[in-house]
Image (spheres, rainbow, N blue to C red):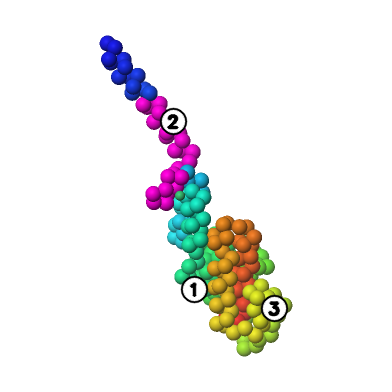
Amino acid sequence: MNRQSKWFDNISAKSAKAGRRRAAADDVQPCQHPGCDAPGTHKAPKGRGREGEFYTFCIDHVREYNKSYNYFNGMAPEDVVAYQRDSQTGHRPTWKLGQNAGKRRKKGTAHIDDPFDVFPEEAAASASARRPRRTVLASHRHAFETLDLDEAAERQEIRARFKALVKRHHPDVNGGDRSSEHRLREIIQAYNTLKSAGFC
Ligand SMILES: [Zn+2]
C-alpha cells in the first residue's frame, strides 16, 4: 500500500513542521501592533488597573507605545501621591487618622520608621496644629529645591510644577530609565513633604 504510507509520511512531516513553529512561537511572540509581524521582543505595561499585564511589541512599536503612554495621565496630584504611597505600603488600605490610628499601631509593625515621610497624614495632622505659620524648615527648603521652585511659590504653582515634573520624569516616557525613576521618587517625596506641611 504505497499510497497509504506516502500519506502517513506527509502527516508526520507536517506535524514536525507545526511542532517547530510552535516552539518558535513560545520563544518569541509576534508584535501585537496591528499588522506588524516583527518578533515581539519587548514588553510594555498595559497601564493603571492592569498591573502585571503586558503587551508584546517589536522594538519600533514599543518605542511608539512608550512615547504615548503616561501611567499617571489624567490623575490629580493627590491621586498620584496616594498611588505612590500605596505602592510603598504594598497597596494595603490606608488608615484615616482618628478612628483607626490606635489600631494601626497595634496591628501593623510595632514601630514604623518613617524617615522619608511616606505617611503624610500623620505629618499633616501635626503640621495643621502648627498653622498658620510659614517657617521654611531645611526639609521644606530641600523640597522646594527638588521641585525647582522658589520658597515663596504658591499652592497653584507647586501643584502645576509637580504635575509637569511627574510627566517629564516618568520612567515609562524615558524608556524605563532607572535614573528617571529615582528622580520621580524624589519629586513625589518633595511634593509629599510640601503637602504635609500645608504648602499645597
Ligand atoms: Zn511591531
Which of 176 and 190 lies nearest the eye of the viewer? Answer: 176
Label 2 environment density (alpha carbons within 10 Å; few <14, some 14–19, many ≥20): few
| Disc 1 element | loop
* Residues drawn in magenta: 14-38
In the figure, is residue 111 to the left or right of 86?
right
Disc 1 marks a residue whose amino acid type is: Ala
Closer to viewer: mark 3 or mark 2: 2
Label 1 environment density (alpha carbons within 10 Å; few <14, some 14–19, many ≥20): few
Disc 3 marks a residue whose amino acid type is: Arg
Q: Is mark 1 within 8 Å of ligand 1?
A: no
Residues marked 3 and 1 touching at CB (< 8 Å): no
Disc 2 marks a residue whose amino acid type is: Arg
Q: Residue at x 58, y 71 (%)?
A: 165
Q: Which residue is mark 3?
A: 141
In whole angstroms, how far apart are the C-alphas of marks 3 and 2? 62 Å
Question: Is 51 drawn above or below residue 200 in the view shown?
Answer: above
Q: Residue at x 49, y 38 (%)?
A: 27
Q: Residue at x 54, y 64 (%)?
A: 86
Question: From the image, which quarter does the N terminus lie in?
Answer: top left
Q: Earlier in the sequence, mark 3 or mark 2?
A: 2
Q: Answer whether residue 89 is visible to the viewer in this image.
A: no
Label 3 environment density (alpha carbons within 10 Å; few <14, some 14–19, many ≥20): some
Q: Position of residue 76 (x, y in %)?
A: 49, 73
Marker disc for residue 20? 2
Q: Residue furthest bottom?
A: 132
Q: Position of residue 124 (x, y in %)?
A: 59, 78
Which of 40 and 73 lies nearest the eye of the viewer? Answer: 40
Question: Is 71 drawn above or below residue 122 in the view shown?
Answer: above
In the figure, is residue 25 to the left or right of 152?
left
Closer to viewer: mark 2 or mark 1: 2
Q: Which residue is mark 1?
A: 76
Q: Residue furthest top?
A: 1
